[in-house]
């Protein structure tokens, strides 16, 4: 920064550069958790879909087992009814027993049909679950890979942040206390931008035109001059 004649102004420009980089890094770090959350949306969706398919498969299996139990009961009932046939004395009793056996046999047939349908459904659901499990595994791999990269970026930014903070502290020690206090005040009220250059006689902080006489003085870069509008410290940066 040979174009800046005033040592204190040069230090202010330097510390503003560090400040801007620190703000940039902090902003990036603050956004990384949201990026990770957005990446996890796809994984959460895949896991939710798998959970739904698994629950349906379990429900189908549970219902099939229930029907198999009922089928066994019906078979046992039919066996006992048929075992009573030799005991029958009259045709009326025989016909009644046959009717009762027919009802149980129909129940057995209904249970068997439903069980077969549920077996087919279970096979289909099992295939769906296997497919969803593979999708979840891939989503997990992609998420962990991307999260690892983001975590590494965060760590690198942290290292750089500490370097910049150390450099900023070193520069602060060389700035006159009163001037440093003014700088820190501007940093606080001007959203982290206390020192700006002037381009085409406009302050790049508030974009208000600088009076010609003051602009001429700013171009010398030999003293501290503040913007009449936003109070930021101004300097001239040759093209």
Image (tube, grey):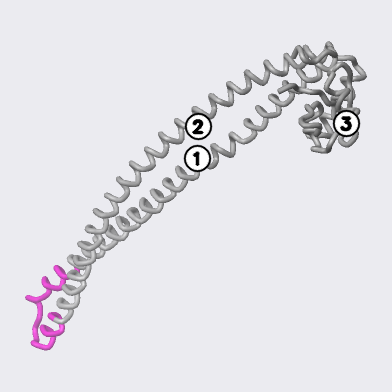
Is residue 82 located in the magenta-colored stretch of the structure? yes
Residue lying at 84% horizontally and 18% vertically, measured from the top left: 221
Q: Position of residue 40 (x, y in %)?
A: 50, 41
Residue range of the region highlighted in magenta in the rendering: 77-98
For the residue carrying disc 1, how many other residues have a C-alpha within 10 Å: few (<14), some (14-19), or many (20+)?
some
- Crowding around mark 3 (Cα neighbors within 10 Å: few <14, some 14 to 19, many 20+) is few
> Horizontal and vertical percent for residue 11?
80, 15
Q: Which residue is mark 1?
A: 39
| Drawn side of residue 184 relative to residue 110, left or right | right
- Is 194 on the left or on the right of 166, as rendered? right
Q: Nearer the viewer, residue 53 or 99?
A: 53
Alpha carbon distance from label 2 to label 1: 8 Å
Residue at screen point 89% across, 18% down: 223
Task: Give the dominant element type of the magenta stretch: helix, strand or loop.
Answer: helix
Question: Is 181 within the magenta?
Answer: no
Marks 2/1 in contact by CB < 8 Å: the verdict is: yes
Expressed as whole percent of the image width and height from the top left, the position of residue 146 reads 47, 32
**Label for residue 212?**
3
Residue placed under numbered mark 2 in the picture? 147
Element carrying mark 2: helix
Position of the N terminus, as image quadrant, is: top right
| Tag 1 secondary structure | helix
Residue at mark 1 to residue at mark 3: CA–CA distance: 53 Å
Of mark 2 and mark 3, the one earlier in the sequence is 2
Residue 224 falls in which quadrant of the image? top right
Q: Earlier in the sequence, mark 2 or mark 1?
A: 1
Secondary structure under tag 3 reads helix
Horizontally, is 61 left or right of 107 in the view?
Answer: right
Rendered residue at 87%/25% (across/down): 216
């Amino acid at each position: 920064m040979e174009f800046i004649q005033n040592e204190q102004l040069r230090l202010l420009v330097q510390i503003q550069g560090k400040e801007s980089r620190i703000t940039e890094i902090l902003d990036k770090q603050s956004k990384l958790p949201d990026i990770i959350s957005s990446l996890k949306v796809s994984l959460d969706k895949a896991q939710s879909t798998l959970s739904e398919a698994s629950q349906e498969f379990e429900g189908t299996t549970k219902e099939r087992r229930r029907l198999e139990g009922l089928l066994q009961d019906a078979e046992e009932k039919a066996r006992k009814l048929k075992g009573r046939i030799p005991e029958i004395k009259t045709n009326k009793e025989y016909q009644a027993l046959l009717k009762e056996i027919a009802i149980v046999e129909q129940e057995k047939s209904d249970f068997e049909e439903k069980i077969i349908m549920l077996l087919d459904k279970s096979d289909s659901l099992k295939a769906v679950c296997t497919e969803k499990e593979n999708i979840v595994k891939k989503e997990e791999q992609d998420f962990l890979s991307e999260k690892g990269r983001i975590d590494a970026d965060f760590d690198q930014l942290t290292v750089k942040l500490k370097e910049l903070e150390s450099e900023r502290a070193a520069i602060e020690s060389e700035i006159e206390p009163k001037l440093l206090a003014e700088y820190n005040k501007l940093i606080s009220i001007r959203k982290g931008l206390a020192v700006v250059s002037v381009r085409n006689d406009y302050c790049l902080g508030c974009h208000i035109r600088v009076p010609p006489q003051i602009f001429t003085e700013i171009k010398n870069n030999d003293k501290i001059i503040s913007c009449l509008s936003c109070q930021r410290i101004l300097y001239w940066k040759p093209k």
